[in-house]
Image (cartoon, rainbow, N blue to C red):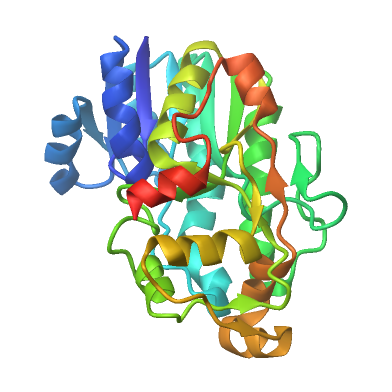
Amino acid sequence: MRVLVAGATGAMGTELVPRLVDAGHEVFAMVRSESSRARASQLGAVPVVADALDRAQVEAAVRQTAPEVIVNQLTAIGHIDTRRFARSFAATDRLRTEGTDNLLAAARATGVRRFVAQSNGAFAYTRTGGPVKTEQDPLDRSPVAEMASMIAAVEHLEKAVLGATWVEGIVLRYGAFYGPGTSMAPGSQQLEMIRRRKFPIVGDGGGVWSFVHVADAAEATVAAVEKGGRGVYNIVDDDPAPVAEWLPELAAMLGAKKPLRVPRFVGRLAAGEAGVVLMTELRGASNAKAKRELGWHPKHPTWRRGLQVAS
């Protein structure tokens, strides 16, 4: 198939594009600048330059490449400062709203038949009820102020993609990425903070995280491109775990001392309300639907082994 990947040179795109090429697809990479052309070509894609926030440029790129499938991997997430969570996600929020709308409009104008989009299954689920959520569970209806804009952007993306009746809309709710190019890559700031005991457990550390190796997420995305059906899929590993469990184990993998523990009010001062939520109230996700319907099984089924290799 002819596949256009928007966001082709990010952490996910770098893993995804070569896999699509290896699977026999003709892959086009929508990149923002001329300087990204060479990188897209190295990955095996045919580059086309367009600013995702410019609707005319996006439509021109889609008309030029005439894809059967568009994969939206547009993000601009760098280091996440939990005290300024909204600021950390502001650029990505705009890509998830305006960028998605632009891609969908171009897809409609050119007759694209399938649209696959990156969503968030790591931070966005409702914080009530059981510790592990399925695709049927709602996103957070009462987020703390610093997380509200991020979750609103995720909801906008999902409603737009799933509500586009003229295309087969598929939403992939990825877990927390680790592996090459991610915030938990070897030598990353986040791992160094854990190594230096600057990443404490807040409160009871009861927030449940679902991880996924970025290569496994890419494999799942290929499966969605080839045989996904309209709807939402959690793309996470088999082993959701509370912070109080995974953080000390990761510290041990790094050869570090056990992380410090601080009460919620201290965590709020140091990491903001969003940081407290991530540490104490987050919910994990189930990958049963993706396994069943996409035939996908992560090669790194648990962060306990995957992070050990990645760290």
Q: Quadrant of the C terminus?
A: bottom left
Front residue of 4 and 80: 80
Q: Report which quarter residue 274 is drawn in.
A: bottom right
Q: Which residue corresponds to the image point at 14% horizontal and 48% vertical from the top-left?
A: 35
45 lies left or right of 175: left
82 lies left or right of 131: left
Q: Quadrant of the N terminus?
A: top left
Front residue of 276 and 93: 276
- Say above or below: 212 vs 226: below
Q: Report which quarter residue 163 is drawn in.
A: top right
Number of numbered labels in the structure image: 0
Res. 95 in view: yes
Front residue of 28 and 269: 269
- Say above or below: 266 vs 124: below
Relative image position of residue 231 (x, y in whole percent): 68, 25
- Say above or below: 186 vs 120: below
Relative image position of residue 277 (x, y in whole percent): 70, 69
Q: Report which quarter residue 16 is drawn in.
A: top left
Q: Which residue corresponds to the image point at 22% horizontal and 25% vertical from the top-left?
A: 45
Res. 64 in view: no
Relative image position of residue 15 (x, y in whole percent): 32, 35
Q: Which residue corresponds to the image point at 62% horizontal and 24% vertical from the top-left?
A: 290
Q: Which residue corresponds to the image point at 60% horizontal and 48% vertical from the top-left?
A: 210
Relative image position of residue 153 (x, y in whole percent): 62, 52
